[in-house]
Image (cartoon, rainbow, N blue to C red):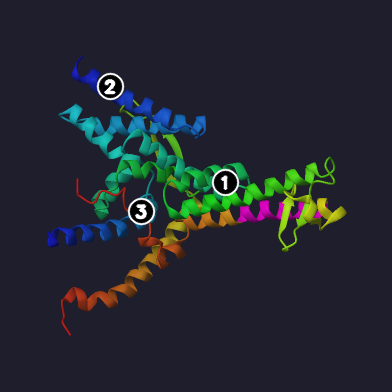
Amino acid sequence: MTSAQLMDARIENYLSRLETAMRGISARDQEDILREIRAHILDSVAGSANGEAAVDRVLGLLGTPEELAGRYRTECQLTRASRSFSPWLLLSTCWGWAKLGVKGTLAFLVALFGYATALGLTVAVFLKPFMPSKIGTWVGPEGFVAVGVPAHPEVMHELLGNYFVPVMAVVAFGFAIGTTHALRWMIRKRLPRQHSEMTKSGAISLEASSIAISKR
Amino acid sequence: MVNNSNGDRGQHWEAQLRKGCLEMAILASLWQTRLYGLEILRELSEKSELDIAEGTLYPILSRLKSEGLLESEWVEAEAGHPRKYYWLTTPGRRRAREMAGAWSEFAGKLALLLRPVVGGKER
C-alpha cells in the first residue's frame, strides 16, 4: 500500500466508524456531518509535507468517532428536546444526559418517576371499567392510600367510587404535563444559551475538557 | 510537586474561562464574513489565541445552526471538495451583539477590581 492509499484508508475507516456511532441522529444530518468532517480532514491535510502525520494529528484533534458522535448527539438532542413535548424524546435525551453527570441523572430520575406514574394511572383508568371492584384508590386501616389493585382488599376500602376515572385521568394528565415542563426547564437551564447566564456563572461553568490550551 | 499541582489548577480555570467564551467567540468570528469550519478555527486561533479542538467546534456549529443563530451553505471549492460555509442570521447577529455588550460591561467592571492586582501593588 502506498502512503496515499494508507492515508485514504485511515480517513475512510474513521468516517465509517463515525457513521456507525451516529445512530439516533437523522439520516440527513448524518450525511451532512460526514461530508463536513471529510472536508475538514482533507483541508487540514492538504499541503502537509508528511501526510500521514497530518492525518494522525487531525484525527486526534477530532477525538475518537464515538466521542465526536456523542458530542453531536448531546448538542443536537438537548436543543431539540428543550422545545419538544414528546415524552419519548425527553426521556431518551435525559438518558443520554444522565451518562454525563449528576444533573443529567437527576433529570432522568424525574423523567422516569413522572412518566411511570402517569402511565400507571392511565392504565388503571382504562382497566377500571373492566375490573370495577378491584381497581380503585384504596385506604387501609393506617390511612395508607394506594392506587391500583389492593394487596389486602379485606381490610381496605375504596375512596373515590364513581369519581375514580375522571379524578385519576386528571391526575395522570397532570403528572405527564408537569414532568414534561420540569424536564424542558431543566434542559433549558443546561443549554448555554442566554447571555444573562454567561454574565452570572455560565461563562465559567461549562465543562473544560474539550479545549486545547496549548498553542498549536 | 507542589508547583506542578498549582500549574494544573492554573490551567484548569483558564480552560474553563476560555470554554465559556466559546459560543460568543464563534459568533464574533462570523461578524464580518462567512467562513467554513477550518477558517473559524484559524480565525479564533490567530486573533484571540483561542485554540479549540475541532471535535468541539463542529457539534457547537451544528447546535447554533439548529437554534437559528447560524445559516450554512455548501460551496464548491477549488480544493476538489465542497466546503460548508456559515454566516450569522439576524437573530445570530442580535445574540452576538448582546453577548459582546454583556461581556464588555462585565470585563470593564472587573478591570477596575483587577487593576491593583495587575499592577502588583501590595497593601
Which type of secondary structure does the marked residue at label 2 adopt?
helix
Q: Is residue B100 magenta?
A: no
Mark drawn on residue A118: none
Crowding at dot 3, Cα within 10 Å, few <14 / some 14-19 / many 20+, comes out as few
- What residue sits right under mark 3 in the picture? A207
Does A170 appear in magenta? yes
Q: Chain of mark 2?
A: A
Where residue B117 sits, quadrant-wise, is bottom left
Report the residue that reaches farthest toward the right. Answer: A162
Q: Nearer the viewer, residue A175 or A210?
A: A175
Proximity of marks 2 and 3: CB atoms separated by less than 8 Å? no
Give the vertical position of B27 relative to A21 (above or below). below
Question: Percent position (x, y) of residue B18?
Answer: 30, 57
Q: Quadrant of residue A9?
A: top left
Label disc, if present, on residue A8 of the rendered structure: 2
Q: Residue type at mark 3?
A: Glu
Mark 1–mark 3 distance (CA, rounded to whole Å): 22 Å
Query: Which chain is disc 1 placed on?
Result: A
- Mark yes or no: residue A191 visible: no
Question: Cα distance, mark 2 to mark 3?
Answer: 33 Å
Q: Residue furthest bottom?
A: B123
Q: Quadrant of the N terminus of chain A?
A: top left
Q: Amino acid at mark 2?
A: Asp
Q: Camera-side residue: A21 or A6?
A: A21
Callout in the foreground (2, 3): 3
Q: Are marks 1 and 3 in contact (CB under 8 Å)?
A: no
Magenta stretch?
Answer: A166-181
Q: Most extreme residue toward the top, as rendered? A: A1
Q: Residue at label 1?
A: A90
Residue occupying the point 45% across, 63% down: A197
